[in-house]
Image (cartoon, rainbow, N blue to C red):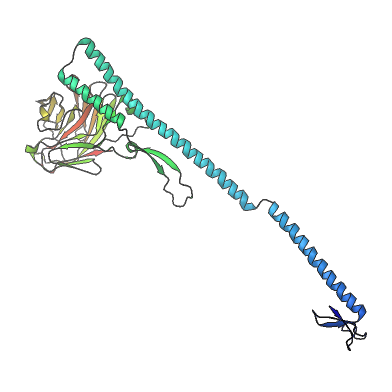
Amino acid sequence: MASGFINKTCMSCNVGLITAMCYECKKTFCTKHFVEHREELSQQMNNICQEHDILCRDLAHEFSTTHPLLAQINQWEQESTIKIQAAANAARIKLQQLLDRSKNSLDASTSKITKELESSRASNNYTEHVIKTWSDRLQELRTLLNHPTPIHIDYENNLESEIRLIKVTDESLTGYFDGTSHRHEINNECSHNPNFCFREIFDDVSGKIILSEENRVATCLGDYLDRSCVSCLGRYSSGRHTVRFRIENADMTHHMFFGVVNSSEKLVKDLANSKSFYGWWDLAYYVVGGNKKKYDSTKTLRTGDELRFVLDCDNKQIILEHHRTNIILNLAIDIQLCVFPWKIIVLLLDKSSCVKILH
C-alpha cells in the first residue's frame, strides 16, 4: 500500500477525496474505505487460515483411520500364510514318509536276509551259489542305501499365483526308476501300503530287444538264434504282487516266455538252463528249475491277449492268468534253487514280437 494525495475520488464512494491507493489492485480509496478495504483483506486472510486448519484436520483424520484396502491386504496375508504353512507341513510329512518308507523297505529286506543267514548257518546248509546270492543281495542293499531314490522339491505350476507353493516328490511316485542306477525291492509292507505307487517297467535287455514308451514296451528285432530276453525293474522278496502284460504282437512261430529268476542272474543266452529259471513258455510248457515240461493244452498266446502275472512270494509260487481263455496256471518255486529276491523275465524269440506292461 502507499498513501498520498491524488486528485481523484474514492472508487468505493465516488465522493470522498482520495487519501490512499492499493498498488496490488490499483484502486484508490478515501480514508474510510481504505480502512474497510484492509479489513476485507484481513477477513480473506482469516478465511484462508481457517480453510488451511480444516484441511490439516481432515488430512490427519483421513490417514489416522484404516483404509478399506488395508483390511483386504491383511486378509490376503493371513490366507497366504495359512496356505504356505499348510504346504510346508504337508511337505515335511511327505518327506518323512518317503524317508521312513525307504528305511522300512531296507529294514525288511535286511531282516529277511538276517533270518536266512542265521538259519543256514545254524543248519550248516549253504553252498557257494547261495553265498554268492546273499553277497549280491547285500551289495544291492548297499547300493540302495548309498544311492537312495532321489527326492525333489517341486513348485506349484500356477502362473496366476504370486506365491508358488512347494511339494515333495520322489521318482517312484512320479513315474519310473532309472534302470541304469536303481533296483527297487518290493517287500510285503509296500504291497499292502495304499500310498505305495511302484509301477513295474522293463529294465535290462539281452539280445536284440528295444524298449519304448518309458520302458513299458519291449519289441524284439532279432530271431530265435538271438535268444533275446528282457528283465523287469522290481525285486520281489515277500508279499503278493501283480503285473499285467498285453501281447502287442505275436508271430506264433516260437513261444514267448514269462517267468522269474533270481535277481542276481545275468541275462545270457543260456539263461533258460539256469536252476533259478521258472515260468511258462506260452501256454504249452512250464519250466521248473530250468527243466521244461509240456502241458496237454494246445492253446497259444495271440496278439491282443492280456496276462496277469502274480508273484506270491509268501507262498513261494507264481501264477499266470490268461484272460481270453480264462486259464490260470500255478507254479511252485523251490527257493533253494530260485532264491529271493526274484525278478520277472520275458523272452521274445520272433522278430517283431512285442509285449507291453499295463498300468
Query: Horizontal and vertical percent for residue 338?
Result: 18, 23
- Residue at the extreme left of the image, as rendered: 225
Can residue 207 be seen by looking at this rendering? yes
Q: Is residue 192 above or below residue 152?
A: above
Q: Residue at x 28, y 26 (%)?
A: 240
Count how many numbered circles sit on residues in the image: 0
Q: Nearer the viewer, residue 152 or 229?
A: 152
Q: Is residue 22 above or below residue 50?
A: below
Q: Residue at x 70, y 55 (%)?
A: 62
Query: Which quadrant holds residue 281?
Result: top left
- Residue at the extreme top of the image, as rendered: 123
* The N terminus: image quadrant: bottom right
Q: Is residue 102 above or below residue 55?
A: above
Query: Which quadrant holds residue 207?
Result: top left
* The C terminus: image quadrant: top left
Query: Horizontal and vertical percent for residue 214?
Result: 25, 43
Left or right relative to 351: residue 123 = right
Query: Horizontal and vertical percent for residue 128?
Result: 15, 19
Q: Nearer the viewer, residue 205 or 359?
A: 205
Left or right relative to 76: residue 187 = left
Left or right relative to 204: residue 224 = left
Can residue 333 be seen by looking at this rendering? no
- Residue at the extreme bottom of the image, as rendered: 7
Q: Residue at x 88, y 83 (%)?
A: 4
